[in-house]
Every structure is written in C-alpha cells, then in structure tokens.
Image (cartoon, rainbow, N blue to C red):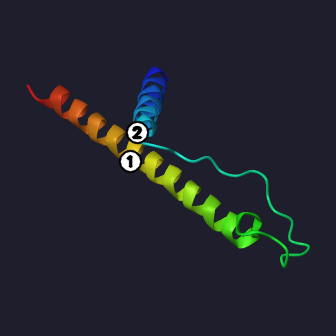
Amino acid sequence: MADFLNKRQRLHELLIALIHQQGDLELMDADAPTIDSTSGLSDERDPARWLDRNQRVLSKYQSLILSAITLEALLDAEHDEKISKP
C-alpha cells in the first residue's frame, strides 16, 4: 500500500511540475451557451466554438497526464533497474 501511495504522490508531483511549465494554461468553460437560438449569438457564445474550445482544453490536460504517467513509468523502471543490478 505504501508503494502505491508513493507512486501516486510522485505522479501527482510530476503532473504539477508539468502544469507549472505551461505558460498560460486555460481552464474549461463551465458556462454552457444555450442552444435555443443561435442566430443572435456572438462567436464567444456559439455552442460549437464553446465545445471545440473545451475539447482543446481537455485534450491539453490529457496530454499532460499521459506525459506525467510516462515520466513516472520511466523513473520507476530506472529505479527497478538500479535495484536489480548487483
């Protein structure tokens, strides 16, 4: 159990470090535009643009998470390699 918690903490720290390296990381827009009438909506309130933007933001976060997981796995493999060498 301690190993799992250590791995989880290390993964969390890697993710935070990757986030800090990002210049200006956007947050998802929780305020969904209404779809009842799009004719009078500005580009900012266009549901398609809102959805595209949130998908881009989500994709960026997924990339950061996958990068952190990869880095953690590499660190773990390097640690295991050092332990197994006499």
- Is residue 20 rendered to the left or right of residue 26? left
- Give how far apart the Cα atoms at labels 2 and 1 are: 8 Å
Residue pictured at 30% horizontal, 35% vertical: 76
Dividing the image into 4 quarters, which one contains the C terminus? top left
The earlier-in-sequence mark between 2 and 1 is: 2
81, 25: nearer the viewer: 25
- Secondary element type, mark 1: helix
Please tell me the numbered disc located at residue 31.
Answer: none
77, above or below 5, in the image: below
Amino acid type assigned to the residue bearing label 2 in the image: Leu
How dense is the environment of label 1, judged by Cα within 10 Å: few (below 14), some, or many (20 and up)? some
Image coordinates of residue 29 in percent, x first then y, are 70, 52
Please tell me the numbered disc located at residue 18.
Answer: 2
Residue pictured at 45% horizontal, 37% vertical: 15
Q: Nearer the viewer, mark 2 or mark 1?
A: 2
- Secondary element type, mark 2: helix
Image coordinates of residue 82 in percent, x first then y, are 16, 29
Query: Where, by quadrant of the figure, is residue 40 drawn?
Result: bottom right
- Is residue 18 rendered to the left or right of residue 44? left
Query: Where, by quadrant of the figure, is residue 45 drawn?
Result: bottom right
Callouts 2 and 1 close, C-beta under 8 Å: yes
32, 81: nearer the viewer: 32
| Residue of label 1 | 67
- Is residue 47 rendered to the left or right of residue 81? right
Q: Residue furthest top?
A: 2
How dense is the environment of label 2, judged by Cα within 10 Å: few (below 14), some, or many (20 and up)? some
Residue pictured at 40% horizontal, 42% vertical: 68
Image coordinates of residue 42 in percent, x first then y, are 76, 69
Residue pictured at 55% horizontal, 61% vertical: 56
Amino acid type assigned to the residue bearing label 1 in the image: Ser
